[in-house]
Image: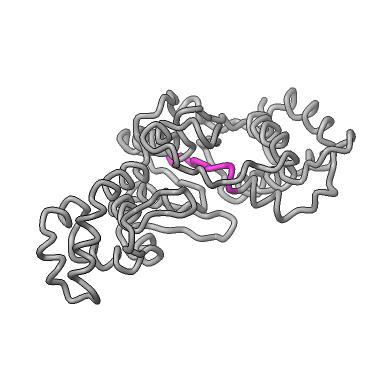
């Protein structure tokens, strides 16, 4: 049995961009703060976790996902990445490859879907996965073989940890978001149903289907405004199921990779040296702990 580490890259790229001054530039005077911070995070991860199998995933677009076909407003309120960051994202992809980590992105499937697909494949083969992210949505992947790990905060979550954080079990996360929605991703949910009510409903019913199969029981629940909640659910039925679909991570994204492709063999000097020269990262090279033969 192997442990496969699957990194949701962009949250850590953004974190680096906003935490390291833009005064850090390459020899041409262009900001490289996000690349530098992301590089530090990857090197620290490699040193501390010593992964034998690892992959990086990236989001390629905010508005071409298959989810936008079903709901054009999906993620529509997000501001485009600052120009000073956009040119660094490709450098982060190049960095991952130079450090010896395969990188995956798709214009129709999000990084979450690529992780979900890879995790489903490897757990089916009897392996473990560590999903490295700060995105609560990926909590839905957690089970006996999949762990959620926000590396920046040292926050590891098993199924009980997801429930302690969100109030619902991993398999209920899409149902929770179907009810409460998610303003960050422009997932509407049911109007008037917040997180606290969604948790209460999913304590009483296992999923959205069970809730809608017996709205009469919802109206009789011992929660504040139960009859009103049932009425809101009835009015928001279509959006509830649409929202759950939007929040459900795909397990069938077009990413073909096996253990051999994800085996970590170290950094590639032929890629590192010209990249680090372009970025002005000369001293960072000394922090690389493993090189390909």
Image location (x, y in percent) of residue 166: 38, 63
| Left or right, 73 with reference to 229 | right
| Left or right, 258 with reference to 172 | right
Magenta stretch: includes residue 214: no
- Quarter containing the C terminus: top right
Magenta stretch: includes residue 8: yes
Nearest the camera: 195 or 27?
A: 195
Quarter of the rendering containing residue 136: bottom left
Image location (x, y in percent) of residue 222: 17, 76
Nearest the camera: 190 or 102?
A: 190
Q: Is residue 104 above or below residue 14?
A: above
| Left or right, 140 with reference to 262 | left
What span is colored magenta in the figure? 1-11
Q: Residue at point 59% right, 43% down?
A: 10
- Quarter containing the N terminus: top left
Q: Residue at point 55% right, 60% down?
A: 154
- The way the protein has been coloured in the rendering is one colour
Image location (x, y in percent) of residue 148: 44, 52
Tag count:
0
Q: Residue at point 72% right, 37% down?
A: 88
Q: Residue at point 83% right, 30% down?
A: 278
Q: Is residue 210 above or below residue 10?
A: below
Image location (x, y in percent) of residue 125: 32, 33
């Amino acid at each position: 049995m192997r442990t496969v580490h699957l990194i949701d890259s962009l949250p850590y790229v953004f974190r680096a961009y906003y935490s390291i001054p833009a005064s850090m530039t390459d020899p041409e005077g262009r900001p490289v703060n996000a690349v530098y911070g992301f590089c530090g995070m990857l090197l620290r991860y490699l040193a501390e976790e010593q992964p034998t199998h690892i992959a990086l995933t990236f989001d390629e677009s905010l508005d071409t996902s298959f989810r936008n076909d079903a709901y054009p407003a999906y993620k529509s309120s997000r501001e485009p990445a600052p120009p000073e960051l956009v040119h660094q994202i490709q450098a982060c992809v190049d960095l991952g490859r130079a450090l010896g980590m395969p990188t995956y992105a798709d214009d129709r499937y999000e990084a979450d879907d690529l992780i979900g697909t890879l995790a489903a494949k490897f757990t089916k083969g009897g392996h473990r996965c560590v999903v490295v992210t700060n995105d609560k949505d990926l909590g839905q992947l957690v089970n006996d073989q999949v762990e959620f790990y926000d590396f920046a905060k040292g926050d590891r979550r098993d199924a009980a940890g997801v429930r302690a954080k969100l109030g619902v079990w991993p398999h209920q996360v899409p149902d929770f978001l179907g009810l409460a929605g998610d303003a960050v991703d422009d997932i509407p949910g049911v109007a008037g149903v917040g997180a606290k009510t969604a948790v209460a409903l999913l304590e009483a019913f296992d999923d959205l289907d069970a809730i809608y199969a017996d709205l009469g029981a919802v109206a009789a629940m011992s929660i504040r405004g139960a009859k009103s909640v049932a009425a809101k659910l009835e009015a928001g039925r279509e959006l509830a199921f649409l929202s759950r679909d939007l929040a459900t991570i795909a397990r069938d994204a077009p990413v073909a990779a096996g253990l051999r492709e994800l085996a970590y063999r170290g950094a590639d000097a032929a890629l590192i040296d010209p990249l680090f020269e372009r970025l002005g990262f000369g001293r960072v090279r000394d922090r690389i702990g493993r090189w390909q033969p």
